[in-house]
Image (spheres, helix red, strand yellow):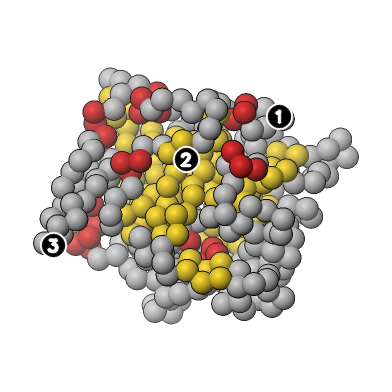
Amino acid sequence: MGKLGSNRYGKRKKIKVKSEIEKFTFSFIFIVLLFAGCGDKEEKATLDITKFDGEYLGEPFPYKNAEVFLDGLVSENYSIQNVVFSPDGKEFYFTRTTLDNDSATIFVSYLKNNSWSVPEPVEFSTVFNESDPFITYDNQKLFFVSDRPVGNIEESYFDYNIWYVERDNGKWKNALPLSEINSKEDEYSPSLTESGKIYFASARTNSEGYWDIYESDLVDGKYTRPEKSLYPVNTEYRDFDPFISKDGNKILFTSDRPKGYGGGDIYLCIKGEDRRWQAPINLEEKVNTNDYEYFPRISYDGNFLFFTRLVPSEEHFYQDKAPDTRDPFEYIYLPEGGRGLVYWVAADSLFPVKF
């Protein structure tokens, strides 16, 4: 979700493309900056990620309650929309966005000699927006979303599509679009099982709640025609940001369906013996609040749930009830900005099953 955020909540707007100067600057600054609030807007680094060491950057484990993960990732000018660790725990990826959600970049830091490197934009980064990284269980592919152009399209507007990169001698190769999956509408939040089946969110025309969750099987190296995941994963409300378990029998996702805690809540669905999704379980007050919680991800060791909470800015709009049309301006909660904070919590305190 993210800048991103505006689209994912329902409101579509023209994307501002990052300048070459901005991308060049990103390469030389720490991601984890807090900015001084002085009149000349002088930037001041107050947190250096290279001072952290060990597993999960040395953060104290949140055994009982959800805690902010590295609150220094958020600054006066930037926020964080999602974090992902590689399966071996040696690479730390996250998406940094501007607070107006108009620019997003994936950063990476490496664990070397028990210390973390200075975060920098990923090597496949461009002047366009990128977000929602997912690394496959064999650590050989990374999927993400981007509004970079695909083929001949109108230059004034780009939709978000799923892309992927593969490793070659430890380096990521050039990014390729996932052509079997992408549509003329937005796609977000790719998540894969160990066998390669992909789940993602999309606003394509047959989506009942503007955002629905779709799935596609990997057959002979190609993805099949995407199909909507079945009820009760999808409803007439917005359902998005899926995270599918390694075996494909459990799914976490965000929804703004009724009887939640407000905004968007994170839910868990488990497949029963009949292979159908059972009733969704709201993760309740250990995770969900009256703000938006989204982008759930289980850590590489299965011990922690990471998720993002949008702390609202003043530029938000509220509706009294859910829409009965696909008009993206008719939804309950339309954030135009806000501060994304990443939280984490021990998984065994939340789930009746092991991911």
Amino acid of disc 2: Tyr
Q: Residues within 10 Å of mark 1 (few under 14, many from 20)?
A: few
Q: Residues within 10 Å of mark 2 (few under 14, many from 20)?
A: many
Res. 195 in view? no
Image depth: mark 2 or mark 1 in front: 2
Q: How far apart, in angstroms, are the residues tagged by discs 3 and 1?
A: 52 Å
Q: How far apart, in angstroms, are the residues tagged by discs 2 and 1?
A: 21 Å
Which is nearer the eye, 72 or 138? 72
Res. 5 in view? yes
Q: Residues within 10 Å of mark 3 (few under 14, many from 20)?
A: few
Q: Residue at x 72, y 30 (%)?
A: 352
Amino acid of disc 3: Gly
Q: Which residue is mark 1?
A: 353
Q: Are marks 2 and 3 in contact (CB under 8 Å)?
A: no
Image depth: mark 3 or mark 1 in front: 3
Q: At which x and y percent is residue 36?
A: 18, 52
Q: How far apart, in angstroms, are the residues tagged by discs 2 and 3?
A: 31 Å
Q: Residue at x 49, y 47 (%)?
A: 308
Give me the disc on residue 39: 3
- Report the side of 43 relative to 296 (left or right): left
Kindly give the residue lying farthest to the right in the view shown.
Answer: 274
Residue 326 falls in image quadrant = bottom right
Q: Are marks 2 and 1 in contact (CB under 8 Å)?
A: no
Q: Secondary structure at mark 3?
A: loop
Q: Which residue is mark 2?
A: 343
In the rendered view, tell whether residue 322 sits above or below residue 66. below
Along the polypeptide, which appears first: circle 2 or circle 3? 3
Q: Secondary structure at mark 1?
A: loop
- Report the side of 52 relative to 145 (left or right): left
